[in-house]
Image: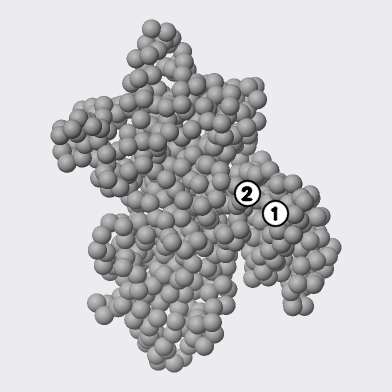
Amino acid sequence: MATAQATSDVTQNRQRLSKLLQLHGYSACREALIILVDHFTNSNKYESHEDFVSKLNHVITFETQTENSIIDSDLAYLVIKKLNKNDVVDLETDDDAAVAPLVITVKNVEFQQEPVGGDHKHSNSKPVTSSRANDFNIHYNFLLKRLESLPVFKDNPITSLSTLNGSSQPTIRCICFGLLIKDISKINAYLLIDSTGRVPVRISPDTNFRNRLAYTNCIVIVEGVYANPDDLLYAANIGLPPVLLDPLQDKQLACQDDKLIVILRELYMDDEDVCKYVDMLFTGYNSMEDPPSVFILIGDFTRKHYPIASEFRKHSKKLLRIIRGCDNLTGCHFVFVPGPHDTSHDDSPKASTIMPKQPFTKEQMPINLLQLSNFENIHLATNPAHVCVGDRRISVVSHSYLKELPKNLLHDMADHNEDFFESAKNIMLSNAHLSAGINKVYHSSMSLWHRPDLLVLADAEAFGNKYDYSCSKQTDTTFTTMPSFSRQYSQFKVYYLKSGEVEDSQVSSEVLEQIIDDSSDDETKDNGNDNGNANDPDAIQIIEDWDQQSDSLPPPSPGSGDGDDGDQCMNDDSVACERDSNPDNGEQSPRSHINLD
């Protein structure tokens, strides 16, 4: 029901804005409407649809040089940039104005009954459905227009594939832009597809790849020679396009508040040991004078798959009861993002690849338990989801991206493991799509219409990989994978809103043992939770010297179970257990901690 309502709201917003624009003498193409609706729904500065269209009309009339009544995607982006710039100027010049409260919204993607997944593949012998083809054409044309606006392509224009197919010249030197896929009807053969047609591509040992890692199922720039008699494009150079997305706001001016956003993945609430760590985490944040603004909780929320809602509900209530006991967190926002198997009725491995995921229902996640205790900011999100905190945009997606991507490897010149993660980030951002590189169906729900400030890849297959991408350029997107809270020693991430930095964090097992020892006499069995330490200032701590430990934490041994506490030492003898002592002086290992409060 919630999903149907969200889809209906998106459709109504498009229709309403389209009619209002027509009343003002404008006609907006579909790409522009998508961009404008996305901006309107993610902004809190417009009182109504009429207010938004009125300001948009003012900007077009007085601040642009266009005389065209048709609003395309380029004009839509230009108007949005000017609207954002005007808001920043107004904020800086109004010295007496009170500081506006931080506005937090969650944008769910449009969920359809025909999701993207491993079973929804098309080949060159079977044309895609009109809906999928239309999604790809809109996305492709959006990127093409922005690419053609770059100065380098003014003198070297992009050649459409229909031009190659209809040419009578024997050979044509060209630069093409399209989706590169495998031709499954032939061995080691490839196809390039754009919105006008498709041509076979010959990739030889002499082909130069501009990226250290190259994959199929990506939209790429191909430079080469098209041989008409062979109907074949001989590729000389292949590379990803530049990142063509604009940020919602200037990142240097985006946020003036130094707030915390806590991001957690895989809270296995059917594991009693994990419940203790989760309880301690929220108890610690509850003791802070200024708690985090947002908690983004990403599934899976159970170790075992529970296809029946009532069975899943039994365990999700444990998490909600822990949160409900933290009365200092009533003003925080809680975003629940389903994991690959949480909302699926299919327990097969393919279920984790089907995207997008619909939000939890209230039968699965009974949020009324929190709402009755004055927790009003509860969001049941889709997967993927986009969280807007002020003018920061956080895009979250949880699926087996890192497992599926190597299957489409075309070229490998990587020197180290970091190239793989950086390549994943570049593919998503340059293609403006969260399933680029792993799926040839460019479903609109996975599209990125703005450059996010933080891109969170909560990959179900990233266990054992620790990598944080933090670019020195403030205008770039911070990219991070997510550890498993349940399987990787209670690790999670903290995002600092003002600086845009991501910090590795962890619940201390030493503090947990102390809490359990102190309260063992008074402990009661209430859903496996220990709520007797709400004011313990040491209840949660952050790792300060992460770089002194191994870059990749090994998984627990198969016989120990995934829910082991912090007493278990790592398999690598060269890496000390968190609670080991220094054999020389009896001091603790170098993984020192600082209190959050």
Q: Nearer the viewer, residue 32 or 347?
A: 32
Q: Place residue 560 in its image quadrant.
A: top left
> Going by the picture, which residue comes out furthest to the right?
23
Image location of residue 343, percent across then percent down: 48, 35
Q: Is residue 313 above or below residue 463?
A: above
Q: Place residue 8 in its image quadrant.
A: top right
Image location of residue 321, percent across then percent down: 52, 21
* Mark drawn on residue 40: 1
- The answer to whether residue 45 of the structure is visible from this angle is yes
**Residue appearing at x 39%, y 72% in the figure:** 239
Q: Place residue 14 in its image quadrant.
A: bottom right
User: Identity of the amino acid at label 1?
Assistant: Phe
Secondary structure under tag 1 reads: helix
Image location of residue 326, percent across then percent down: 55, 24
Q: Which residue is mark 2?
A: 390
Q: Are marks 2 and 1 in contact (CB under 8 Å)?
A: no
**Residue appearing at x 56%, y 43% in the figure:** 259
Secondary structure under tag 2 reads: loop
In the image: residue 589, left or right of residue 152:
left
